[in-house]
């Protein structure tokens, strides 16, 4: 077997030629299994980041690894000029388990949102209606391509890339009146994360998403849910919208969809998807055999191995534990959680907590200065959850 490189060797290699777009921690992760990862120096970490909600089934889930090995030996890639069996199977599974009828495959969350924005415009263009404006939310995050950057309601993400693509308008999340006032004759769609992820794990107010649906219906506007982060079981249901008694016209997925492999998808109702005719949109790699074979295995495992039930059970246990810590440590302002999508708002430095946890072998994430985000694999055990909680308790005790 090849010698594994140390943290230091991998860091030096990275710094030489990898673009510096990420502020990286001084470790390199080289191996993973379930909820655990190992760095180049052999240190083990409990992973409450999960590749930022990608490794929902933990690292190297056996069914995903097996499907990848099988597919890699059979057929890695063919063009979408031909039919692709695992792509068709994954589309069927997504349709059978969601509101949607048709799926367009791509390679990332940003691409899925690009497809959704393009489909919304094309839908109205096909009807001869001049509707091209997309309303999104302040503090939203939809990606880094030029259209999804414009859709993202965060100035700091957009700075330096102006002029932005036109016809994006932002309103505060959880404010139906602001949305009503922003709607106009040019509005094509409202694009919203059911729970804001990068914006700070912000929960929708009671009834908010249902009201959005009825406002969109009243105005003849499409509703798009960005479930890139909250979809694929993260909240304890396969899709977050299931919690809120409302369905969108279009939904975007990525992250957890491939069990660790790059893939994105846009799911739409039959009526809306009809505007994606031959030649209207495309992606060379979108829906390729390897990624979709992984997607089929990941989705089946999620549905058949009690993953959603485990997410709800361990999610409730972790949320209770965090609430216990909140009562003990006054600098914990709020715990926001649904399933294993968790944010802890602090009156203390979240990046500092992240570093202290990492030293003790627990990986967690900070959103800005004040929010700690926990995204454990959905397959995490009760004991692993307690293990993470005890590290957090120790770290909080030091602050
Ligand atoms: N949408 C949401 C809600 C996200 O959280 C993200 C990534 O964090 C994206 C879109 C962009 O996904 P990607 O990085 O795969 O392009």
Image: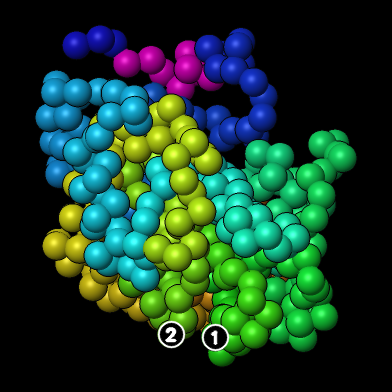
Compare marks 1 and 2 and give the one earlier in the sequence: 1
Q: Is residue 326 visible?
A: yes
> In the picture shown, does residue 86 fall above or below 223?
above
Where is residue 308? Give x, y as percent: 26, 68
What residue is shown at x 40% (from left), y 43% (from top)?
Answer: 105
Q: Quadrant of residue 133?
A: bottom right
Region of the chain picked out in magenta, as a range: 4-11
- In the image, residue 12 lies at what x, y percent? 56, 13
Q: At 77% across and 75% down in the image, what residue appears?
A: 183
* Quadrant position of residue 77: top left
Tell me, yes or no, whether the highlighted magenta stretch contains residue 8.
Answer: yes
Label pair 1/2, CB-CB below 8 angstroms: yes
Q: Main secondary structure of the magenta part?
A: helix
Task: Pinpoint residue 59: horizontal percent, then vertical percent.
Answer: 28, 43
Q: Secondary structure at mark 1?
A: helix
How far from the left and from the top, in percent, is residue 357? 50, 51
Question: Which corner quadrant holds the N terminus?
Answer: top left
Q: 239 or 281, which lies in front?
A: 281
Give the residue pinned by disc 2. 245
As drawn, is 366 to the left or to the right of 275? right
Q: Residues within 10 Å of mark 1 (few under 14, many from 20)?
A: some
Task: Please say which color scheme the image uses.
Answer: rainbow
Q: Quadrant of the C terminus?
A: bottom right
Q: Which residue is mark 1?
A: 210
Question: For the point 65% across and 68% down, which residue is it?
Answer: 190
């Amino acid at each position: 077997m090849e010698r594994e490189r140390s943290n230091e060797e991998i860091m030096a290699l990275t710094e030489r030629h990898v673009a510096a777009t990420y502020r990286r921690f001084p470790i390199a992760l080289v191996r993973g299994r379930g909820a655990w990862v190992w760095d180049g120096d052999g240190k083990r970490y409990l992973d409450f980041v999960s590749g930022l909600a990608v490794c929902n089934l933990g690292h190297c889930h056996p069914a995903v690894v097996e499907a990848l090995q099988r597919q890699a030996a059979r057929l890695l890639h063919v063009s979408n000029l031909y039919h692709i069996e695992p792509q068709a199977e994954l589309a069927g599974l997504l349709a059978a388990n969601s509101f949607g009828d048709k799926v367009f495959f791509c390679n990332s969350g940003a691409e899925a949102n690009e497809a959704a924005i393009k489909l919304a415009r094309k839908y109205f263009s096909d009807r001869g209606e001049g509707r091209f404006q997309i309303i999104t939310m302040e503090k939203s995050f939809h990606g880094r391509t030029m259209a999804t950057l414009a859709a993202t309601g965060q100035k700091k993400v957009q700075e330096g890339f102006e002029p932005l693509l036109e016809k994006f308008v932002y309103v505060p999340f959880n404010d139906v009146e602001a949305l009503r006032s922003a709607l106009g004759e040019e509005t094509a769609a409202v694009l919203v994360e059911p729970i804001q992820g990068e914006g700070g794990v912000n929960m929708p107010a009671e009834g908010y998403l249902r009201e959005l649906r009825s406002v969109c219906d009243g105005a003849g506007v499409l509703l798009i849910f960005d479930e890139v982060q909250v979809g694929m079981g993260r909240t304890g249901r396969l899709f977050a919208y299931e919690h809120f008694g409302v369905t969108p016209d279009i939904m975007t997925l990525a992250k957890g969809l491939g069990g660790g492999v790059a893939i994105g998808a846009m799911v739409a109702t039959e009526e809306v998807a009809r505007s994606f005719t031959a030649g209207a949109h495309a992606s060379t790699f979108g829906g390729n055999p390897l990624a979709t074979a992984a997607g089929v295995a990941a989705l089946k495992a999620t549905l058949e191995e009690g993953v959603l039930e485990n997410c709800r059970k361990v999610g409730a246990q972790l949320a209770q534990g965090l609430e216990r810590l909140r009562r003990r440590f006054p600098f914990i302002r709020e715990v926001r959680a649904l399933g294993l999508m968790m944010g802890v708002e602090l009156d203390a430095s979240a990046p500092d907590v992240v570093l202290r946890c990492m030293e003790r072998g627990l990986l967690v994430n900070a959103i800005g200065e004040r929010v700690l985000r926990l995204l454990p694999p959905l397959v995490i055990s009760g004991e692993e959850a307690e293990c993470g909680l005890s590290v957090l308790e120790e770290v909080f005790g030091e602050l």
